[in-house]
Each structure stands twice: as C-alpha cells, then as structure tokens.
Image (cartoon, rainbow, N blue to C red):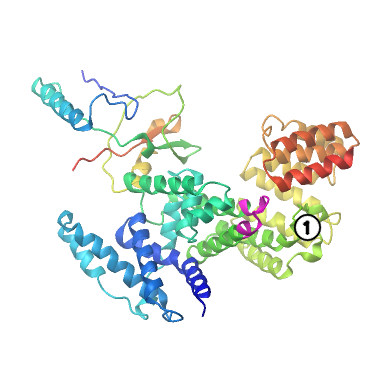
C-alpha cells in the first residue's frame, strides 16, 4: 500500500528557526529513505498567498485568487505538473475530472537553490 | 519655460508614454517590478539631463535606451547566476534605440493588461495594477480615487507583483479556449474602473473624472490591439455613458437621474460615435452582454425625453441580456423599464420577489421606493428610501435619496 502524509500547519508557526527546520526535514528524509518507505521525495509548497483555485462549471474554467474555501470539500488526491507558466498548470488542472464538481487548488512547489 | 511647466510636461509624458515603454521592458526582462525600477530610474535621469525645455524629439527612444541600460546593469551584477542563453539576451539588450528603430518596437501592452487582469489575482489587485502599470497612475493617485490609503494600495501592488512572480503567471496574450474568459476579466476591470468614476464622492470629482478617461483610454487600447466584438461593445457603451456625463451632475454636484437630465447637455458627437461603433459591431453577428448594454444606452440616447423613450425596445434588450447574464440586477433593470409600459401592480409583485437576492443592493430599494410612490403607497416608499439611504456609502447618492424621502413627507 502507499500512503500520503499531508502536512498541515499554520504558516509561520514553526517552533524552530528555518535552518534548523530544513536540517530536521533532511534528517527525516534520510531516515525514511534508509528504512525504504519513501515512494516520492515530497515537496514544500509556496505560501497560501500564491494559491489559485480552478473549478470547471458549465464547461468553463472558473479561476479565482486564493485557496479553496469550501469546508465540505476534502482533499482527495494530488498531481504534480511540470509546466512553464501558471496558465499552463491551470489549463491542465481544469481538465482533472473532479474540477467539474470540486475545486483544484494550484500552488507552486517551492524551489530551493 | 518655468520649472512648474517643465514638471507638468514630464508628468504628462509619463502618463502618456510609460505604459507602452513598461510593457516593452517587462517583455524584455520578464518581471514587472524590475521593469518599473528601470523605468523609474530612466525618468529620474531625464529630470536632471533634459534641462529646461530640451525634451528630446522622441523622448521614448531616450527613455527606453536608458531603462534598458539600467536593466543590463542590474543583470550584469547578478551575472554569475545566468545561463549562456540569458547572457546572450543581455548582450543583445545593451544597445541604444534610435528614433527610427522605435517604430519597430512591438506594442506589448496587450500582454501587460492580460497579466494585470489575470483571474489568479483578486479584483482590487487587478484594478490597482492596471492603473499603475498601463495608465501610469501613482499609488497616491490610485488611493485618492478609491478613498484608500497610499500604504494600502502599495501593499496591494507589492502582493500582486509577488504573486505574478512566484506563481509564474504568463506574460502573453492567451490563445484558443482561454481567450474569451480571460478577455472577459480584462473588460470587467475596465468597466469597473469606469463605473467607479460614476460614483461621485464628496470632493472626489477631479480624480473620478480621471478614472473615466483612463477607462476610455484602456478600452480604446484593447480595441486597437485586439479586434473583438465584446471589446468593441464595451468601448461603445463607455462612449455612450460618457456622452451623458455632463448632464449627470448639477452645478452644485448633486446627482441627476436619467429621467430628469437636461438632454441638451448630452454630447451629440460622442453619441454619434458610440452609435456608429455599436451598429458596426452588431453587424458582426456576435452579440454579447456589453453590446446589449450599449444598445440599451443607445436607445436612451435616441429619445427626446424620458416619456418618449422606446421602452418596449429597452425591455426586449434587457430580456436578451438576461438570457446571457441571468443576474437579479439585470432582472431588476428589466422590471424598472417595464414599469413604464406595464401595470405597475404586476411589476411591483415581481420586484418584491427579488428582495432576497438583492437585500444589500441600494439601487434595489431606491427602485422599489420609486415604484411604491408611483403606486400611491407612500408609507412603503418612505420605508424603502430609508433602507436605501442606510445601504448607500456615498455622499452624493445619499443626498439624492434624502431629497426623494423629504419630497414624500
């Protein structure tokens, strides 16, 4: 079986400084990899202020600023797209079947350099 | 030339030319903030280097060359991060633009307006960004027009630019299936800017008139760069609205509704211009909401008086509009027009059914009050005027509603 661990927290609520946190994530990653449980490397996301939500209604993509806000909707899965622009990512997100009745929140994966 | 004239000239130059130069610079460097910084730098240099009355014949060429040099400087400082391809792009940028070559610089403002009005940004951010980048308004001017603080507008602009950068919003004119929805967003922003100009607040008359002009300028710009029936419909609509602008306010600044306007004060040249545009657009056979709203406006403009208006035609147009935009506001407008020709009792009943949907909408209660008064239900009318006054956040509007209420007492 594969399991997805979803990371929820209040932004800026880290209990240690940023470098320590990165170090702790690296250590966790190494430990889990050594144990053979890592199926995907995982990612950090850009803050919620970068979120855009797309819904397909009456065959038309409705794009709005911000995260999805419907508390009745639950996270049901995810894709990671490799796209040049947000527009391209939204174009694909709108074609996810659940976009017809649910919401797809699109956020950039954080890039560390 | 006095120093003051010179400053005014430069400010006019900025308002007139900065949008096009900025759009071009963003296309070159891919970032609005960087392009703005470079353009700001060029204008600062211009104030010291163009002494007295020696503004160059083609100031754009000078400004573009100077701004591009600034971009190149910034890039060279960060060169170690650049790929070979990027370095090549930088080298090709580092050249002066001659007056002749300026003709060949592409007009990138359409890309810029699509980015600024991107639906991934919220509406207030879209409006502020469009006014700042394409119209060259300063955060202070935008704040004054929207009764907001300069800091709030600045923060809004910073956040919007951050979102564009971080999420990678494309700097391009959308194509294919995406175009109609994206264009709608652009047209909605322009219409919103125009409508804000209507909402005359106390002491705001001057900056509000500016907003109307900017909206017309943007609508013209979109039409020039993207032939589309709805974009043309919006321009026709704004032109017809603008034609009645002078009649909408008394010399003391009080609001005058359409029914009481002195139609001699309507600008016939603008009416003719708007009508011709609308007729040519409707001939293309793709009617949309803006074209229909323009058609409604044109019917009003054709009438000698409120009473001789072709109400049947207006009701028909609102019904067609409702098929495209089934909103309670459109329905209300249809009913208000229908009240001119249909039994008022039936209309009032239908208007009452809209209350849940429009309970926060000031014009709903103002319209309902007017209908009640015409039906002789004065107590109901007074009650509705009071609700309308409570919902209005606008001094001029409140004063008008107050006068209606007082007339009933």
Q: Is residue B198 magenta?
A: yes
In the image, taking residue A89 as reference, residue B335 lies left or right, namely: right
Look at the picture and state if B396 lies above or below B94: above
Is B208 on the left or on the right of B33, as rendered? right
**Could you tell me if residue B233 is visible in this image?**
no
Q: Name the residue under label 1.
A: B250
Q: Is residue A11 visible?
A: yes
Write the start and end of the magenta stretch as one range. B196-209
- Judged from the image, the secondary structure of the residue bearing numbered disc 1 is loop
Left or right, A19 with reference to B147: left
The residue furthest left is A34
Q: Position of residue B190 (x, y in %)?
A: 55, 54
Please identify the residue farthest to the top as the structure is shown.
A1
Question: In the depicted view, which residue is nearer to us: B255 or A34?
Answer: B255
| Residue A16 higher or lower than A61, as above or below | above
* Residue drawn at x 21%, y 30% as measured from the top left: A42
Q: Which chain carries label 1?
A: B
Residue B317 locus on image (x, y percent):
71, 50
Between B77 and A74, the residue placed more toward the observer is B77
């Amino acid at each position: 079986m594969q399991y997805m661990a979803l990371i929820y927290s209040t932004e800026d609520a880290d209990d240690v400084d940023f470098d320590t946190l990165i170090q702790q994530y690296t250590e966790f990653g190494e430990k889990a990899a050594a144990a053979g449980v890592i199926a995907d490397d995982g990612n950090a996301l850009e803050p919620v202020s970068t979120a855009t939500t797309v819904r397909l209604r009456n065959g038309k993509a409705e794009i709005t600023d911000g995260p999805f806000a419907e508390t009745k909707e639950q996270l049901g899965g995810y894709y990671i797209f490799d796209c040049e622009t947000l527009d391209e990512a939204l174009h694909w997100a709108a074609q996810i079947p659940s976009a017809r009745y649910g919401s797809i929140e699109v956020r950039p994966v954080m890039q560390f350099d | 030339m006095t120093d003051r004239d010179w400053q005014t000239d430069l400010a006019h130059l900025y308002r007139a030319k900065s949008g096009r130069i900025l759009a071009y610079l963003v296309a070159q460097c891919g970032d609005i903030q960087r392009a703005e910084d470079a353009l700001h730098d060029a204008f600062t240099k211009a104030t010291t280097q163009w002494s007295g009355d020696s503004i160059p014949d083609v100031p754009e060429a000078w400004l573009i060359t100077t701004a591009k040099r600034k971009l190149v400087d910034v890039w060279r400082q960060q060169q170690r991060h650049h790929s070979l391809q990027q370095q090549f792009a930088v080298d090709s940028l580092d050249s002066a633009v001659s007056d002749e070559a300026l003709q060949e610089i592409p007009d990138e403002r359409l890309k810029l307006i699509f980015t600024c009005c991107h639906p991934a940004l919220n509406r207030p951010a879209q409006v502020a960004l469009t006014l700042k980048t394409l119209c060259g308004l300063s955060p202070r001017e935008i704040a004054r027009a929207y009764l907001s603080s300069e800091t709030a507008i600045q923060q809004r602009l910073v956040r919007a630019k951050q979102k564009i950068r971080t999420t990678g919003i494309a700097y391009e004119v959308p194509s294919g299936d995406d175009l109609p929805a994206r264009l709608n967003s652009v047209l909605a922003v322009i219409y919103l800017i125009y409508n804000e100009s209507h909402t005359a607040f106390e002491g705001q008359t001057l900056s509000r008139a500016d907003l109307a002009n900017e909206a017309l300028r943007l609508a013209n710009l979109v039409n020039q760069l993207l032939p589309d029936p709805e974009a043309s419909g919006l321009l026709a609509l704004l032109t017809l609205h603008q034609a009645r602008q002078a009649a909408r306010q008394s010399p003391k600044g009080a609001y005058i509704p359409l029914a009481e306007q002195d139609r001699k004060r309507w600008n016939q040249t603008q009416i003719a211009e708007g009508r011709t545009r609308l007729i040519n657009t409707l001939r293309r056979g793709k009617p949309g909401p803006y074209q229909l709203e323009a058609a409604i406006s044109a019917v009003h403009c054709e009438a000698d008086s409120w009473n001789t208006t072709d109400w049947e035609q207006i009701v028909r147009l609102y019904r067609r509009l409702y098929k495209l935009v089934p909103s309670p506001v459109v329905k209300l407008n249809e009913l208000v027009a229908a009240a001119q020709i249909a039994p008022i009792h039936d209309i009032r009943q239908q208007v009452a059914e809209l209350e849940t949907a429009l309970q926060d909408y000031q014009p709903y209660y103002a319209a309902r009050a007017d209908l009640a008064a015409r039906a002789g239900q004065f107590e109901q009318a007074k009650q509705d005027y009071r609700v309308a006054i409570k919902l209005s956040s606008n001094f001029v509007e409140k004063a008008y509603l107050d006068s209606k209420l007082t007339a009933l007492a």
